[in-house]
Structure formats: structure tokens, C-alpha cells
Amino acid sequence: MDEGLKHSASAKEYMPMIPTFVTGIPTGKETGLYLAADLGGTNFRVCSIKLNGDHTHELKQSKFKIPLDLMKNSTADALFSYLAKKVEAFLDEHHKEYSANTNGSLKLGFTFSFPVDQTALNRGKLIRWTKGFDLPDCVNKDVVELLQTHIDLLGVKVDVVALANDTVGTLLSRAYSNNEAKTHANTVLGCIFGTGTNGAYFEKLSNISKLDLTTVPKGATGMVINTEWGSFDNTLKVLPKTKYDDIVDKETANQGYHLFEKRISGMFLGELLRVILIDLFERGFIFTELFESRRGSLPHRLSEPWLLDSEVLSYLQIDDSTDLKMSQLVLENHLRLPTTREERLVIQKITQVVSHRAAYLSSIPIAAIVGRVKDQYKNDDRNFEIGCDGSVVEFYPGFQEKILEAFNLINPLEGTNKKLSLKIAKDGSGVGAALCASVAI
Ligand code: BGC
């Protein structure tokens, strides 16, 4: 983290540690109506958020599955024109008064959850794609400019005033809804464990040596940093490495990058299990009878990369039915894979090992950041909470408990009376982007 705060965000060997130009944490008193657009995984979401100024908000939202042919082998213009049209469609449906072009412009916060070299609250160039996106002509382009251009082409009255990573949104939105008088806790970190993984926290300005201080608003003492911890240890100095991690990395478009993420997040857990099973099969330990009965093939959902969804692992993880009958059904339904009892026992064990490693690794950046910021709060007796979002932390059975178990082993709060809790930040990206838009001038 220290090295990342000194070096450029695109250096492969350090964590990117991207300054976000967000210089304050919400108090819960913010008000107003804002739009948010969220691109970060398989869906594009557009929402409007009314901040009520009392830790609460109202939200309207539309969700669109991004067509696969816009995620790769396409162009930046094709993708951003699609996004702009969805913003227009959302306004037509929920805020006719703005689409009718009569009431001035709405401010939009753009949650764009990929590594971006940010130079202002509303400026940032894509460093590289992650999570299966691959549109080379978008790299190095300003993503706010791209979205604004395509919105303007449609004649829609929307100003893209802020760019935020989903972790920044999660941090701000949890801080907004956290009523400290009731929770007796400060929100110190926003993190995502979903398709990808990442975290954001508030750092003292004096520690961000790569930042040009003339670009920072007067009076600011710190800034939210988007750590991009998915890129922790890309040179594999300390991370555990198995041959399966290598195989999965080679299958990705961003090979050699985000190696931490590739051990943890939802996009990769299923693929890790799949490549392990294929290895066991190739070594003659499982699926031999099945292979013969199918005259020399395995079901294609098992033999082809990326078709084993991590949702499947979440069912296998906790199956305690006799002979793992529930897993039998899940494997047949999702993968068309008939199994013997012995095979299911093996599959369940591997599932638990893959997810256990993921959860234990997940606690490491959390503990590192908590240990790092605890000094900022040494005269404040409140506990620490972290805002989290993402399908893995929200739905994977036992994931949160395992993170906390490992956190307590590391014990970065030793010597204080503080405790840590994980809080799911509902609507995190949307509300967070609205909060970013609310501070934009
Ligand atoms: C991206 C981050 C994002 C995280 C969670 C990672 O792949 O690089 O920017 O915050 O996924 O969505």
C-alpha cells in the first residue's frame, strides 16, 4: 500500500492505490435528487436516488443485462452508446419531467468499477479491463467523457459530474446510512466481494505522496483511496500459488494482473473448482465411468471454461443431505453432470477448500487497512464497521464468518477496545454515486 501511494496507478508490481478526489465522508445529512449509473459486472444499473438528509434514501432502479457481444470484440463507442440509451430509457420510464427537457439537468454519478487513473472527481482514464471485459480501444480513454458524449448525442439533459468506483460508493453509502449515535461505530472501509473484489478507505493527504496537492480542494485533510486490492502482489511474492491458479490466470484476458482477485471473487471460484475437477479426471481419479458411458466425453458445462457458476458452489458448500442428494440434483441441473456418492464427497471437499482459502485471503486487506487507519481514530472510542457489497459476501454460506475468523487471527485491533463488524451496504453503488454527485460543483 505504501509503495502504491508513491507510484503510478498502472505500475504492475504495486497496488494501484488510486486517489478518488473524494475528500470527505458523508454525515447522513446530505439531500437532493441524483442519478446513478453503475457499470461493473454482468449488469448495468441506472437509478435515481433521493437523499432525505436523515440517513435514509428513496431509490428507483432499472437493471439491464449487458449483452456479451458488447463486453468483448466490440468498441468503446458501441458500449457507451448502449449505456446512454439505457439512461434515456430510465428517464422516460421514471422521470419524464427530465426526459421532456424542461426542468434543467440532473446530476449523474457514474460508478465504473474497473481500474481508472482518476485526475479529478469527474475525470478518469481506464487503465485496464478486468472481470471478463475486453474492449481494447477503451483503454486510456476518459470514461466520463465517453458517457457524456453519448448522452449528449441523444439530447438527454443529464450531466455526468462524478466518477466513482463501486467500493468508494459502498464506503460513502454505508457512512451515510450509519447512524453513529445508534451503532456506536465509524465506517472505515468500503469493500466488494462479488464478481470482482476491491476496497476503498480514507487516507491522510500527507501519506499520498504521488498526489499533486494543487489539484486537491482547499481545507481537505485526506482523500478516499481506491486500493484496487485485486492487484495485490501481481508478482506473486507472497500469495499462495497452485497449478490451478496458473491455469485460470492463463484463461483470462488480463493475464498476470489481478492475481489476488483471481483467488477470491465470484467470477473465479467456479472456474477454480472446474479446473481442479478436470485435473482429477485427467489423472484417472473421478468421472471415469461417466466418460466411458458417454463414449469418451464429459458434459460440456464441465469441460468448457467459465460455465461453472460460483452460485453452484454455494449449494454444494453446505449440503448435509443423506449421500449428498441435494448436490446430486444441483450438479445434474446446473452442469448436466451425473455423479456417484464418492465423487460428490470429493467435490464438496474441494468446494470447501476453495472457498475457505478465498475467505481467509479476503480478510488480509481488511485487517491491513484496519491496522493502518486505527491511528486516525485513537481518540475516538467507537467501534469499526465496514460496508460490504457483492454476491459472495452477501450470499455465499459462511463467507462472512470465515472472514471474521481470519481477521481475529490477525488481530489488528489488539491493544484497543474496538471491535469490527461487517455491514452489508444495500444499494451501495447507487447511493454512493449519488453522494459523490452531491459534492460535485
Ligand atoms: C475492479 C475494481 C472493482 C472490483 C469490484 C475489480 O475487478 O478492478 O475496480 O471495484 O472489481 O467490482
Image (spheres, rainbow, N blue to C red):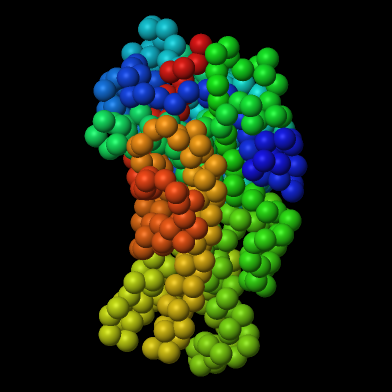
Picture coordinates of residue 441 (x, y %)?
A: 51, 11
Q: Name the side, left or right, on which 95 lies relative to 10.
A: left
Picture coordinates of residue 287 (x, y %)?
A: 52, 87
Picture coordinates of residue 276 (x, y %)?
A: 57, 76
Picture coordinates of residue 55 (x, y %)?
A: 29, 27
Q: Is residue 421 above or below residue 274?
A: above
Q: Looking at the picture, tell me which residue is in the foreground, 204 or 282.
A: 204
Q: Looking at the picture, tell me which residue is in the foreground, 416 or 287.
A: 416
The answer to which image quadrant residue 304 occupies is bottom right
Q: Looking at the picture, tell me which residue is in the foreground, 395 or 76.
A: 395
Tell me if I can see residue 282 in this picture.
yes
Q: Name the side, left or right, on which 79 lies relative to 266.
A: right
Q: Looking at the picture, tell me which residue is in the foreground, 295 or 195.
A: 195
Residue at 60% x, 91% y is: 284
Residue at 49% x, 51% y is: 412
Q: Which quadrant: the N terminus?
A: top right
Q: Name the side, left or right, on which 429 lies relative to 239.
A: left
Residue at 53% x, 88% y is: 286
Q: Is residue 114 above or below residue 216?
A: below
Residue at 27% x, 28% y is: 56
Tell me if I can see residue 155 in this picture.
no
Q: Is residue 316 above or below residue 177?
A: below
Can you name the residue that lies furthest to the left here? 182
The answer to which image quadrant residue 64 occupies is top left
